[in-house]
């Protein structure tokens, strides 16, 4: 098997992965309409029993998700509002696309929050609300609790991060400072029926984490929020309005966030229509067709990109040396979101290219092995590439051109190296985002 | 399955791993003596046909390996010299144990090099030489090429490391500056028969890397050594005697390192008697007996400990969420040697405890999952523990005691946290070293 063959196979597998998580297709395929009967995830809804069918939502994939919903429902859809990242709009028929800033929220996010709340204000028992969520939804759709400003929320989050709080602790606090997050959207929509369709860009696909869980019950309490702030010595450092609200909450003078099992979730259905796992499962099938024994390692990969690259190369070495975890020819698939901790003078690259370069050092000298790491959205850091290919000859070919792979890695400068070797993965924008995908082919 | 059950299972699996790589047992089991016929790895040697049987070697496991050889061969062994780390000696009968410094070589290492060369000087066609190698052998047994000092070699290595040279490039240079490394010992022993028994503490078990490959042909050449130094701009920075030697080498006025296939290797047999992979394979069998579907991921794990911990926790999450890479109850096994990059004010810990703490953050909230990471030698960093257990309740139990897991991890201060939770793995010295072992049990 030549490197060119392996490269072609990896791209074919990536294509299968991406095909399975196209937001437009994912929404269309999640919804099956026959006459007035809509089937979603095994449940049937009679659209004739609803007086109004509306859509709300937020996220970078909002535009194709909205179009898919319009295409499925046609004139049965009465309208709605979905927030997308500035510039990510596009033609829609009945759903208004609002634009806001990402990754940092802005006034547009607050306006969008108010507009979406307005849309939901009219929802009643005979309303069907589609909620379309995707990556970025948390920043695009913002609604601070009464009396709080966006700045108050942001300052509180900053203090928690700096004090070493766990992410679960931070989320508990944030949900208690928002009207929409932590089940708030479901409460606003009640007693309407809610079908929430989700493109997950969150490691682990936790419904209470994606877009901060606007349609999912929150298990944390005001008492816990106080305990978190006390534990980290922040009770008297957070903005005064936050502390005030906390005291009122603990005293029982403010409503709790809606809890799992409460009435407002009785008619809510959350469905992940596209996720990293779904991408990998599709890739697994394609790999099998191409003659590889596939193994899905995990769709929750996190960690420093270079270390993850080393781990993946170690799996390839073991497969060739001992037939573990699988005998070659095999295809190991992984996905998730790694991190690059930049030093003082970062070069050009992205986490996928960095991961690939680290893997290349680990694969050096092996024959018949190829790793591809790519961002499912088609971009990797501030480069035009989605990622890169690494194989057993990457290091020696780079050295022969006067490049220094180990130094490039140390300087987070993988892009020029892979560009020189013609080993970039370039897909262009894919219009979806389910984090990153790693495909490791081991033959020989 | 309670955490206590999982803990007991992990310890039982670790015990099986360690049992398979005890240096004394490993050497005994590699050698089968019936009358004067010695069988080693499928080959039979007639000890009656040798006039002398001697042993040389170096490494931290040298003492138990030497004793095992003595116990197997009894009076048929004529003597020998094996270098061990200062303080790691012990009673032997015929084999003299020399002591030298580790990890940095000292005068003792040079003396040991001369002594071992002296032992080999008398070897002839009717000599059988046992070579006992284990971790640390490269520093314990040093013999610079004629005209070079230990300092010249060390300075050259330092320059290469600082200039971003790859490890393969560095090894090529080092082997050309030594009399023993890179096949040198085999050349000194020729035309004797050599049986080299190896306890591998090297990621990937590469024979040319373990103890710098004293009994393995070197594929690199003087021309390549010059190319390496030129590529990294070191041709005129290395010590003058090194450059001089290089020029003579390239001009053909110095012998090359012995190459694979050369006569001096015709009677050399290299056998890894204990390795991380062998430990994991034994652990795999024990896990199966305990009712877990086992999967050996890799015995070549490298990377930053915290990231490796994250990756392993991601595999556990996926197994519970989707039955990939295996359906629970399953046991994922990995091994290798991770790294901890220390910041300014490191706390107390070791790479296994750091890996476990990172895994604990990733496992937070899961039920029926446990990860154990432990050094096979029974030590982890400058602590009395071999490693630690991580599970789904580690984080919440730590927070309840006022500990801050994420800050502890950032400060490389995992030891106090695991100590407070009673989650340290304490084995005491195991008298072997095949790097680290990770055991991940997933049920539920």
Image (spheres, coloured by chain):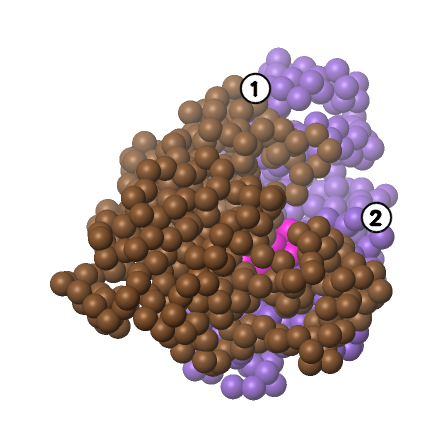
Chain colours: A purple, B brown
Frontmost residue, A195 versus A211: A211
Q: Does the magenta stretch include residue A303?
A: yes
* Label 1: how many Cα within 10 Å (few below 14, some 14–19, many 20+): few
Chain letter of the residue carrying label 2:
A
- Residue drawn at x 79%, y 22% is A239
Asked if B354 appears above or below B83 in the picture, the reply is: above
Asked if A138 appears above or below B146 in the picture, the reply is: above
The Cα–Cα distance between marks 2 and 1, rounded to whole angstroms, is 34 Å
Percent position (x, y) of residue A49?
51, 56
Tag shown at residue A344:
2
Magenta residues span A302-311
Number of numbered discs overlaid on the protein picture: 2
Asked if B237 appears above or below B67 in the picture, the reply is: below
- Residue drawn at x 23%, y 57% is B76
- Residue drawn at x 76%, y 56% is B159
Please tell me whether mark 1 sits on a helix, a strand or a loop: loop
Chain letter of the residue carrying label 1:
B
Question: Which residue sits furthest left?
Answer: B35
Q: Can residue A420 be seen in this view?
A: yes
Percent position (x, y) of residue B130?
36, 60
Frontmost residue, B145 versus A24: B145
Asked if A172 appears above or below B262 in the picture, the reply is: above
Q: Give the prevailing secondary structure in the magenta stretch.
A: helix
Discs 2 and 1 carry the same chain letter: no
- The residue where tag 1 is placed is B402
Percent position (x, y) of residue A57?
67, 52
Q: In which quarter of the image is residue A110?
A: top right
- Residue drawn at x 30%, y 36% is B8
Frontmost residue, A363 versus B178: B178
Nearer the observer: mark 2 or 1; the answer is 2
Q: Does the magenta stretch include residue A221?
A: no
């Amino acid at each position: 098997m030549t490197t060119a063959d392996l490269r072609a196979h990896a791209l074919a597998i990536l294509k299968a992965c991406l095909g399975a998580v196209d937001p437009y297709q994912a929404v269309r395929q999640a919804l099956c309409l026959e006459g007035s009967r809509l089937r979603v995830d095994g449940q049937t809804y009679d659209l004739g029993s609803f007086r109004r069918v509306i859509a709300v939502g937020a996220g970078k994939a909002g535009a194709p998700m909205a179009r898919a919903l319009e295409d499925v429902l046609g004139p049965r859809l009465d309208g709605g509002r979905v927030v997308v990242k500035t510039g990510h709009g596009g033609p829609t028929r009945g759903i208004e696309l609002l634009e806001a800033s990402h990754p940092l929220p802005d006034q547009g996010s607050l306006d969008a929050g108010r507009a979406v709340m307005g849309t939901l204000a009219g929802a009643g028992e005979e309303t069907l609300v589609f909620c379309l969520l995707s990556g970025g939804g948390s920043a695009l759709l913002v609604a601070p609790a009464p009396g709080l400003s966006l700045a108050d929320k942001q300052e509180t989050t900053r203090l928690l991060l700096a004090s070493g709080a766990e992410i679960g602790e931070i989320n508990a606090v944030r949900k208690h400072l928002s009207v929409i997050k932590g089940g708030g959207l479901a409460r606003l929509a009640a007693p309407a029926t809610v079908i929430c369709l989700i493109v997950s860009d969150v490691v682990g696909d936790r419904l209470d984490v994606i877009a901060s869980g606007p349609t999912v019950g929150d298990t944390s309490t005001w008492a816990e929020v106080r305990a978190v702030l006390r534990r980290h010595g922040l009770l008297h450092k957070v903005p005064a309005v936050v502390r005030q609200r906390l005291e009122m909450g603990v005293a029982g003078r403010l409503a709790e966030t809606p809890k799992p099992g409460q009435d407002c979730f009785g008619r809510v259905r959350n469905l992940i229509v596209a996720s990293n796992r779904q991408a990998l499962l599709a890739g697994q099938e394609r790999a099998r067709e191409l003659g590889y024994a596939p193994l899905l390692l995990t769709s929750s990969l996190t960690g420093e990109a270079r270390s993850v690259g080393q781990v993946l190369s170690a799996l390839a070495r073991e497969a060739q040396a001992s037939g573990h975890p699988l005998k070659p020819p095999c295809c190991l698939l992984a996905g998730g979101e790694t991190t690059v901790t930049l030093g003082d003078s970062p070069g050009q690259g992205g986490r996928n290219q960095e991961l690939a370069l680290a893997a290349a050092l680990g694969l050096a000298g092996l024959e018949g092995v190829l790793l591809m790491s790519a961002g499912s959205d088609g971009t990797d850091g501030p480069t035009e590439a989605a990622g890169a290919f690494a194989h057993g000859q990457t290091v020696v070919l780079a050295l022969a051109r006067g490049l220094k792979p180990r130094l490039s890695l140390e300087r987070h400068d993988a892009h020029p190296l892979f560009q020189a070797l013609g080993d970039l993965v370039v897909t262009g924008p894919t219009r979806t985002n389910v984090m990153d995908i790693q495909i490791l082919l081991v033959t020989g």
